[in-house]
Each structure stands twice: as structure tokens, then as C-alpha cells.
Amino acid sequence: MDKIIVLDFGSQYSHLICRRIRESKVYCELLPYDTPIKTILDFEPKGIIFSGGPASVYEKNSPKPDEKIFGLGVPILGICYGHQVIVDHFKGRIKRVINREYGNAVLKIKDKNNLFKDIKSNNIQCWMSHSDTAEIIPEGFDILGETDNSSSAAIGNRERKIFGLQFHPEVAHTENGTQILNNFSNVISKAKSDWNMNDFIESSIENIKTKVGKEKVLCAVSGGIDSTTTAVLIHNAIRENLTCIFVNHGLLRENEENIVRELFKEKLGISIKYIEAQERFLQKLKGISDPEDKRKIIGEEFARVFTKFAEEEGPFQWLAQGTLYPDVIESGVSKGPATVIKTHHNVGGLPSWLNLKVIEPLRYLYKDEVREAAKILQIPNEMLLRHPFPGPGLAVRILGEVTDEKIRVTKAASKIVEDILSEDNIYNKVWQAYAMVGDDKAVGILGDKRIYGHIVTIRIVESKDSMTADWVRIPHRTLERISSKITNEIENVTWVTYAISSKPPSTIEPQ
Ligand code: XMP
């Protein structure tokens, strides 16, 4: 399989470059900027991309790649800071601009081959975000494109196949950005588009078989897409040597425990061990109203339940986790793109003395790729299209202390929200939708009686990746149906409100 590697100099967009390359079916991995040349050679990359980054090349200790990289004969594309690394290495000159250039600029293309092949227009919008620019370009390099503020916005040494872009082709604001990256990977680097999910699944099943052998794997499933796909891949590899557990902490969506058990059994043919733990979780949460305390208690309790199971039903040698690529590779030089294995936040931090080896079959995948894998593995749509649900469950949607009464109200109201959105064909178009409840109450009239009941707040958001989100402009008719069904059918609810805060400054979950 042909590969492109991206060396990460700390840009917030490093993962995005990698994703864009993979979208054109060329396999791409993100590596730290200072990856030794030997490791780079082991990858046999067809092309290497230097990402952007916050540093300036003339700063003391600014990140630089192993110099030998320039002598490999492998095509190189530098983006933003990466572009300046190239200019600096080949003895050009960088200068600090007084006004940091940030935002849209028009790139006038001067060479319609190489990076700009098949781009029809001579002028394209590009996205700049830098404070340094190449003042003198190195010998052997030509200007391939310029903007009003940057006469060397795109440069290249065609013979050595080394190119630099001052702007960011990976962000959506750059017109034809994906084409530019594809031109680098497919045309200049001649990488074949042969990365496909079917092959990934096959080789990942083979890898699991070899790695695990006859040993036993334990996997906690939540019904979410990541843990389900992890379980299915491992199940395909080792069958009964995989044990899946599902913990009911009493803070699940309405009927979730049955839906998940049923889907695993009927649709996936995987049996899961159900652990009834409502009592112990809810007991521990009594009297606790601080959001972080609630999360911590749930995490710790989960670890206890899990450990008890492993001791009683084990021994297990492996713990399966649904960790994704962005969690494995923390982008950014300051943090060091270390391969720190994170405990799945749904599992809440398992004690290291559990002494299990960790297996993470999704560790090379992005979320959209997991969805693609899940489809191929025939994970049913009911699961694929389900909205994300937080590990600590309703505890983060109940403001203040978690009580049976509030659980009853949130569960029933969230079910109504989901049902009505499905009926009105909105459910699949939004990122998340649910109801929350706190301690605030308001007066209402029930028959002839005045009652003092709960205020339920509805939150419906749209988002691409949950990093930012906006509240959905739901048709009034749908809101009206949700509101009246909630007050009519759920005892002790008198008011319904709609949350109209975007993220930032709010978050998706209230706690
Ligand atoms: P926030 O509230 O931070 O949520 O805007 C972003 C996304 O993450 C989910 N979320 C969690 N998921 N454990 C999880 O597994 C958690 O503790 C947790 N907190 C928030 C949230 O539902 C949203 O999709």
C-alpha cells in the first residue's frame, strides 16, 4: 500500500491534512516532526508533508526535521511553517511581517502544472494564517503562485519535487484545496489510491488473530459506534475468546439496556454479559451535585464493577478499547505527538493493576472511517445513526443531585424529543437531541389545581465533530408538539424551554 506521511510541527490542522489525503484513498499517517530518518524510511513514504505550526524558523529551538530528509529524493510539500522550514533549509530568507496575515486571500496561480494541475481558474481563494513570509526564495525554486501580501505564496523546485505553500490547502476555506493535496499525493508523489476499508478490515482481523492468539479479551460495550465496531472486529477474529460486557449504571436512555442487548444478540450474533449495577451507582451519587464529582464517582464505580467482573470471570489477558486516531496522536509539538494510550473516557480510567494488555483495533481510524468500517461490518443502521451519548449518561443531563425523580423525567422527555424528531424527519439531520432537568420549578395548572412542577429544557444541536456546535432552528410546529407531549404525558412537568446557546461559549452537555 502506498503511503504519504505528514510530519507534525504543531498545527491545529495537522490531522486535517492527514484526513484529506485519506479521503482520496491514499493511506496517510501523522508522525512527530523529529521522527528519525530510519523510521521514516521504514514507512517507505511516496511523499512527505510538513504541517504548519506556531513557531518561527529563526526562533531558538524551533522544530526542525532531520536534515537528511531533504536528500531522500522523496517529494516534499511544506505548508505554512513547513514551507518556511524548506525556505530556511535551502538558504532562502524568511521575514516577519508586521501585520499578521489571517483569513482569505486571492492566490494568483502562475504554474498550472504540478500542485495546481487541473484547477480551472487562474485565481483561487486561499486561507492564510501566518506571521512569517519568504522574502527571498532559495535557488532552484520558482514562484508558482502569489497573493497581494505574499509574493511567494506557492513555490517549488520541480526537479527535486520540493514544494511550499504559505496558505493552508487542507481547510475548507481554500478553494480546490483537496485537489492541490491530491496533486501532491497522486501526481507529484505518484501514490496510488489503494487505501480501502475492506482491506483494512481484513488485515486488522488478521492482526488481532496473530496478536491475541489463544488468549482472552475483555471489551466493555456501550452501544455506541466505537465500542460496537471494536467488538465486532475482535469477534470476527477470535469469536468466543472475546467477552463483551454492558454495564447498566441506571443513567441510560429509556430502554437502552434492552435495545443494546437485542441488537448485539439478534443483529450481530454477539452475546454480551449484562451487569445490573443501577443500585450501586445511584447509591454512590446520593447527595452529590457538583458535575466533576459526579463524573469522577461514575468513573471510579465503573472501574470497580469492571475489576470485579475480570476477577470473577477471568483471567483475561487483553482489554479492548475503541480509541480513535486523534486520541492516539495528540497533535501539537508542545504536547509531543506521543503515542500515549488513553483510557476510554466511557470506561472512566481503569486501574493499572488490572494488568491487561491493551488492544485498540480502531487506533488508525478517524470517526468517519469508523462509520465506513461499521457499514461494511454490517452494523445495523439503528446503531450507526444513533446520536452520541455520554459515558456518564444522564448524570450530565441532570443538573444538581441525581434523583430517581429527575431520572424519570429526563428519560421520558428525551424519548419524546427523539420520537418526535424521527417522526418529523429531523433526527438524522442533527448531531444530538435530548431533554435535561434541574432543580428549578415553575407553577402550572393541572385541571383545576395549581401545581409546582419541573422545568424541562430541550437541547438540539448541529455539529460536524462536536468541537463546535450550534442550536438547531427547529420548526415551531415540532417544538410545539414536543412541548405539549412532555407536559401532557410526564407527570409533574409544567414548563418546557429550548436551549439557544451555541458552543462556544456553551458546551453540548450542560454538565
Ligand atoms: P461537550 O458537552 O463537551 O460535549 O460539548 C462534546 C461531545 O462529547 C460528549 N460527551 C461525553 N462523551 N463521556 C463521553 O463518552 C463524557 O464524559 C462526555 N461528556 C461529553 C457529548 O455528548 C458531545 O457529543
Image (cartoon, rainbow, N blue to C red):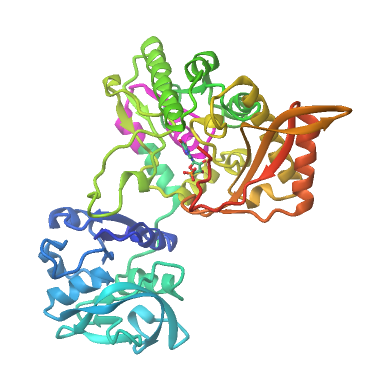
Q: Name the foreground residue: 437 vs 509.
A: 437
Q: In which quadrant of the rendered view does residue 22 lie? A: bottom left
Q: Is residue 121 above or below residue 89?
A: below
Residue 286: in sight, yes or no?
Answer: yes
Q: Is residue 492 above or below residue 325?
A: above
Q: Look at the image and tell me in which quarter the N terminus lies.
A: bottom left
Percent position (x, y) of residue 503?
51, 52
User: Is 167 on the left or on the right of 159, as rendered?
Assistant: right
Percent position (x, y) of residue 315?
34, 14
Q: Is residue 154 above or below residue 192?
A: below
Residue 76: in sight, yes or no?
Answer: no
What's the residue at 35%, 44% (across, down)? 327
Question: In the image as oriented, which residue stretches furthest toward the top?
Answer: 312
Q: How many marks?
A: 0
Q: Is residue 456 above or below residue 106?
A: above
Q: Name the foreground residue: 148 vs 112.
A: 148
Report if residue 227 lies within the magenta region. Answer: yes
Percent position (x, y) of residue 448?
89, 28
User: Is 188 on the left or on the right of 334, as rendered?
Assistant: right
What's the residue at 34%, 68% (across, down)? 185
Q: In which quadrant of the rendered view does residue 413 lie? A: top right
Percent position (x, y) of residue 148?
35, 88
Report if residue 172 lies within the magenta region. Answer: no
Which stretch did the figure color magenta?
207-236
Q: In which quadrant of the rendered view does residue 40 lie? A: bottom left
Magenta-colored segment: predominant secondary structure: helix
What's the residue at 44%, 86% (across, down)? 123
